[in-house]
Amino acid sequence: MNVHVTASTAASTATRTPTPITVAYGDGIGPEIMKASLKVLEAAGAALAPEPIAIGEQVYLNGVSAGIEDSAWESLRRTKVFYKAPITTPQGGGFKSLNVTVRKSLGLFANVRPCAALSPFVATRHPDMDVVIVRENEEDLYAGIEHRQTDEVVQCLKLISRPGCERIVRYAFDYARANGRKKVTCLSKDNIMKLTDGLFHEVFDEISKDYPDIKTDHWIIDIGTAKLADAPEQFDVIVTSNLYGDIISDVAAEITGSVGLGGSANIGEHCAMFEAIHGSAPMIAGQNVANPSGLILAGVQMLVHIGQADVAEKLHNAWLKTLEDGVHTVDIASEGMTKEQVGTDAFADAVIARLGQEPTHFTPVRYNAETGGVAIAPYQRRERQTKTLVGVDVFVDMPTQNPDDLANKLNLAAGGAALSLKMITNRGVKVWPQGLPETFKTDHWRCRFMGDGVRKNADVVDLLARLEKSGVDFVKTEQLYEFDGKPGYSLGQGQ
Ligand code: NAD
């Protein structure tokens, strides 16, 4: 196991002022694994002052659709460190995802999920796997901006920002450097989404130049995911956008053979949240059988973050030793490897009994006591580029299937306007001029109008007024701009 290599200088834990942290015990197995985890952290010498808050099922059922009371924000904004057990999301609509709310409200832009094999103690086909997924946490399709635009068509906006890309990519490189990692791999789909995923890849290439000591590569997400599932030992740190990161981090955790053992950190400029990757497992709640390891490892990430790396190191090594010694909870117990099958509390006690010991099969973990995690510099905006309006895409709802009729109607309506019709697409494929009769069409038409020279928004307003007068049912518009002379819009497929 090739985890963290920088030497630790054991600070005196006795003299530390306790760090206030906000703690949520959550639902299902949450309270029992949180109790066990806090006990282990404290026994390891963590200087913590926990402040409990209520979140989750009971709060949802009390009518708070966000799953968190207003009063809890005060603690979170003051401590800036959130140690969170899993919660149960009630069935049925109307409940917002608490995780998404907390991540976005506190600006937790980086989701960091280490996925390392624990072979042979936990069975896996990939014994040398040791990957850290760094996932962008705030934007992409998860901005949740969705609309139904016509009878047949709904849309979800994929928002990717330059600050979002720069911050996550820089974090991935800084994380790699702080943890002795050798390579950062970018995953995107920029062969198809040339502007959004193209920006992510472009920023990756730009920022990698500041880290000549770290190797880089880029894979298209589909083949990249296949390679990750087949040969994860070829990856080190992976950085990717929100949706891809969500999917591949579950793939990666699953193939370690130990999805129940994963911890994750959600990191922002001001605050951070640490949790297990699994849910509240209501079926086994209250039975003292749940594995507290995911939350303990999230606690290890938290200790590094708050500058108690020496405690993190001691705890992580004792945890590895416990697994090596064959002390396992039921979810990871196996014939031949398990010497003692234990419950939640007994597992915590076994880790505590090994504090100060190091693993002999696994390479002992080393955390960086100097930095206490990755420093995040405030974001510096670059100079704005010159934006020039060159046209507009008008999206039209038309149930009939003939693009020639639509083009005639639009040309008639727009006659004399500064912007004229250049192209119509349906679901992105050009259907006018010279479309193919074989192309399947919906009731949602993107009609591209352009004009010579620099245009004004007034030209768009004038065009829309003419379309309105002619009874064209437009459902949205997107202005077409050039930035420093470079088109800021994609061509139609087949254009
Ligand atoms: P889950 O992760 O709770 O359970 C999946 C399976 O893994 C179950 O068989 C469970 O018994 C087992 N499992 C999970 N954690 C375990 C542990 N620590 N030790 C031993 N076994 C463990 O996923 P689910 O069943 O899909 O979801 C249950 C609830 O959790 C849902 O309400 C869901 O919305 C919620 N959830 C919350 C979070 C979170 O708070 N971060 C994340 C995922 C799911």
Image: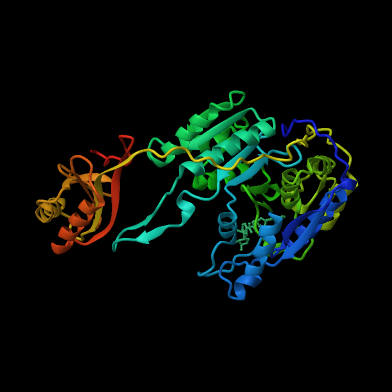
In which quadrant of the rendered image does the C terminus lie? Answer: top left
Q: Is residue 479 left or right of residue 247?
A: left
Colouring style: rainbow
Corner quadrant of residue 490: top left
Q: Residue at x 45, y 51 (%)?
A: 141
In this view, the residue farthest toward the bottom is 62
217 relative position to 360: left or right:
left
214, above or below 492, in the image: above
Q: Nearer the viewer, residue 125 or 14?
A: 14
Q: Is residue 484 visible?
A: yes
Q: Residue furthest top?
A: 212
Q: Position of residue 105 (x, y in %)?
A: 57, 57
| Residue at 61% in and 48% down | 268
Expressed as whole percent of the image width and height from the top left, the position of residue 258 reads: 68, 46
Ligand 1 sits in quadrant: bottom right
**Location of residue 206 in the rendering, given as x and y in whole percent from the top left corner:** 49, 30
- Out of 34 and 46, give the one closest to the viewer: 46
| Residue 375 location (% of width, % of height) | 66, 40
